[in-house]
Image (cartoon, rainbow, N blue to C red):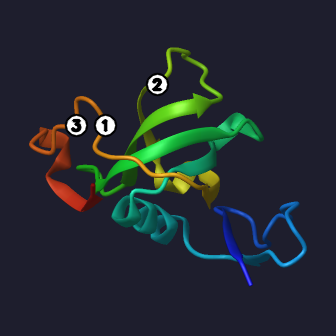
Amino acid sequence: MAWRRLVVGTGASVAPVSHAETDCLQAVSVEGTIREAIATRTPLALVYGGDRGPVRTVHPQVLFLTAAGEACVDCYQVAGYSSSGGLPDWRCFGVGEIERVEVTGGSFGPAPGLNLDASKYADVLAHV
């Protein structure tokens, strides 16, 4: 039986995903899904904040806490919705603002320009 993970960040239920007949859904935490994607270097599809639908395809690089204690993930966005255009490029997402996240197929490595010595990474939770 194949598993396909779909996480709904703020909702109480899992949204349906059309797939082959044996696919199952498993709700897990957004942060847990991000940690898994970083550890396995697997791309994510996510819906962020007020987007309400447009999907972004990202390569999560660093999960960290800001100085204010907010969990954020720096990603290299390679496809999908972007209000600022210019892909691929770096994007920082507040974990609490991610409404849906799904592990997708494929793999990735460290993104161009990744600097784990950057001052904002004083409290790293996970990184590639």
Label 1's element?
loop
Q: Quadrant of residue 117?
A: top left
Which residue is at a point 14% across and 52% down the rendered structure image?
A: 122
- In the image shown, does 107 or 90 lie closer to the viewer? 107
Marked residue nearer the N-terminal end (3 or 2): 2
Disc on res. 88: 2
| Whole-percent x, y for residue 82 in the image | 60, 24
Q: Are marks 1 and 3 in contact (CB under 8 Å)?
A: yes
Q: Are marks 2 and 1 in contact (CB under 8 Å)?
A: yes
- In the image shown, does 6 or 12 lie closer to the viewer? 6
Which residue is at a point 28% across and 50% down the rendered structure image?
A: 66
Q: In which quarter of the image is residue 83?
A: top right
70 up-or-down from 78: above or below: below
Label 2's element?
loop
**Which residue in the structure is indicated by mark 1?**
111
Marked residue nearer the N-terminal end (2 or 1): 2
Disc on res. 18: none
| Whole-percent x, y for residue 9 in the image | 64, 62
Q: In this view, does 44 lie to the left or right of 110?
A: right
Residue type pointed to by label 1: Ala
Residue type pointed to by label 3: Leu
Q: How crowded is mark 3: few (under 14 residues within 10 Å), some or many (20 or more)?
A: some
